[in-house]
Image (cartoon, grey):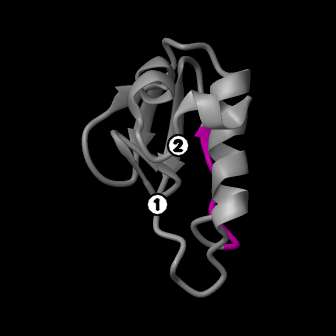
Amino acid sequence: PGHSPGSISIIGDGFVMTGDTLFSGSVGRTDLPGGDDEALIASICRLYRELPRDFVIYPGHGPPTTIGEEAEDNTIVPQDLCY
């Protein structure tokens, strides 16, 4: 949730498909109808808290990354924002 009311992330064995929620070094837009900044941040923080650092992120756009890389390096939603 956050990018749009129907956005979801799908968790598999060692990976998560985040669609337009979380990208490598970025996050999804919330300026579209139904977008919600707070819900987007909460969704990303939940991924950071609940998934192992080596989980691979397959975003809707751009290259794969990992939960650990995004928690450490994502300047839009850094892990410090979540705790």
Please tell me whether residue 8 belongs to the stretch shown in magenta. yes
Task: Tell me the kind of residue under disc 2.
Answer: Val
Q: Residue at x 63, y 37 (%)?
A: 81
Q: 27 left or right of 4?
A: left
From the image, which quarter does the C terminus lie in?
top right
Q: Any mark on residue 28, and which?
A: 1
Q: Which residue is mark 2?
A: 77
Q: Residue at x 35, y 28 (%)?
A: 65
Above or below, 40 against 48 in this view is: below
Residue 8 percent location from the top left of the image: 65, 55
Considering every residue shown, the one lying at the far left of the view is 63
**Tag in front: 2 or 1:** 2
Viewer-proximal residue, 59 or 44? 44
Q: How many marks?
A: 2
Residue 38 percent location from the top left of the image: 71, 60
Q: Residue at x 53, y 54 (%)?
A: 21
From the image, which quarter does the N terminus lie in?
bottom right
User: Could you classify mark 1 by the number of other residues whose Cα lies within 10 Å: few (under 14), some (14-19), or many (20 or more)?
Assistant: many
Q: Secondary structure at mark 1?
A: loop
Residue range corresponding to the magenta coloring: 5-10
Considering every residue shown, the one lying at the far bottom of the view is 33
Q: Is residue 70 visible?
A: yes
Q: Residue at x 70, y 73 (%)?
A: 5
Above or below, 32 against 80 in this view is: below
Above or below, 41 against 37 in this view is: above
Viewer-proximal residue, 35 or 8? 35
Q: Any mark on residue 38, and which?
A: none
Viewer-proximal residue, 51 or 44? 44
Answer whether labels 2 and 1 touch (C-beta < 8 Å): no
Task: Tell me the kind of residue under disc 1.
Answer: Gly
